[in-house]
Amino acid sequence: MAQLTGSTRIARVEVWKCVVPLPAPFPLGATVVAQRDYAVVRLVTEDGTEGAAYGLSRGAPIDVVVAELLAPHLLGQDATDPAALASTLAARLPQHGSEGLVQRALSLIDIAAWDIKGKVAGEPVWQLLGGERGSAPVMLVEGYPLPDEDDDGFAERIGRRAAEGYSMLKLEASMTDQDALARRMAATRKAVGDLSELTVDLAYIWGGHDDVAERAARWPQHGVAWVEDPLHGNDAEGLGRVHAALPVPLAAGDEVTNPQALLTLVAARAVDIVRIDVTCVGGITGFARLHQAATEAGVRVSTHVYPELHRHVVFAYPGSGPVEMFPEGGRWDGTGSFCRPMAVRRDADGVMVVDAPTEPGLGIEVDWSAVQAHSVRHQVVRADSVAGGVS
């Protein structure tokens, strides 16, 4: 392990609100996504060590929460002790519960602190967490519809990805016409054959309906590995009803910021797979407790995109894979505009996998000039200007 040199106390907190336009709008559940909004955080210690984190803000002012609520309490604290940082913030901000925008902001601070902790120790984060080096399969989020694409065109595109070696592919299926959805699923399974498992993201479109059990019972199976987020992960009662009626496994948890909500899903066995996002649930530190509870209850764990971040918990905590990622090119995701994409490879069995990184910390490479170029708000909080500055 590397010896400490200098001070690892936090001297500066920077945060950007970034907006990355997408090549074309695409549907996601009941919404249309035309751009990706991110909060990007950089912690800098007194000895100059930097830690980075980023996450979707979805239009919410997470950057403001980081700069104005959290950052003044972080200055002077040891960046290599993420758990102590969380305890300090909880003690100093008792009126703010660890959920919602505050939890998202806390999560990014925790992730950036783990990046620093790994760099100071000279080890990748997954290794600090006790993981063993290896590789993990990739789940590619390819299945959003393209403009003017019919069922056969959609199925052929997914089939090509299966032939490339992606053993699990995610489809977005917010079509309200159940017969049309059944046709598309049948065409896709025929094109994919037995090369890949398919997961189906419903993006909360069953929320507010009284007939969720009926919808679930009619779900076309077509070899589906799991159906994801028909309702929000906060709705344990509704998800329990869906789970009882669904003929395929159920996954939920994306965007949930209250860890207790996920613990409730697990304790009630309302899902087969709990989706845990380190950018939402208290960072890498928060992930550990949830993974333990799920494992003890016999519930599988799956992570939510951000592959450069989540690969560390996948390698550290058994049963947390696959590593979910968007394809390169920025059609549906904007992180490639400011962060080096994660490398994937085809293994000896022809399966697309990601290897455990060897670089100290998170091993992410952020292009800070690109972050600034996409920034619509940049705040800096440091010891000589606790109120911060905006540029």
Image: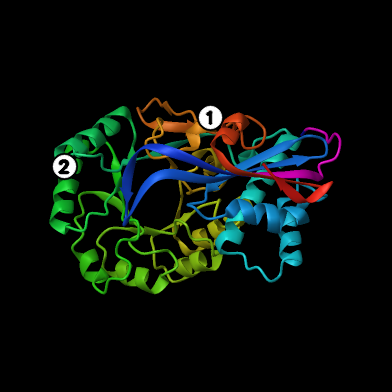
Closer to the camera in the image, 379 or 329: 379
- Element under disc 2: helix
The answer to whether residue 371 is left or right of residue 68 is: left
Spatial CA span between label 1 and label 2: 33 Å
Residue 386 place in picture, x, y as percent: 79, 51
- Asked which quadrant contains residue 130, the reply is top right
The quadrant of the picture occupied by the N terminus is top right
- Element under disc 1: loop
Q: Amino acid at mark 2?
A: Asp
Residue 378 place in picture, x, y as percent: 64, 43
Q: Amino acid at mark 1?
A: Arg
- Asked which quadrant contains residue 42, the reply is top right
Q: Residue at x 18, y 52 (%)?
A: 181
Tell me if mark 2 has few (under 14), some (14-19) or many (20+) residues whose alpha carbon lies within 10 angstroms of its own.
some
The answer to whether residue 80 is left or right of residue 267 is: right
Is there any visible trace of residue 169 in the rendered image? no
The answer to whether residue 55 is left or right of residue 228 is: right
The residue identified by callout 1 is 340
- Asked which quadrant contains residue 96, the reply is bottom right
Q: Is residue 10 magenta?
A: yes
Residue 97 place in picture, x, y as percent: 63, 68
Residue 189 place in picture, x, y as percent: 19, 42
Residue 151 numbered mark, or none: 2
Q: Residue at x 16, y 42 (%)?
A: 151
| Above or below, comparing residue 229 to residue 10 in the picture | below
| Above or below, comparing residue 330 to residue 96 in the picture | above
Total marks drawn?
Answer: 2
Q: Which residues are magenta?
A: 2-15
The quadrant of the picture occupied by the C terminus is top right
Q: Is residue 343 magenta?
A: no
Tell me if mark 1 has few (under 14), some (14-19) or many (20+) residues whose alpha carbon lies within 10 angstroms of its own.
some
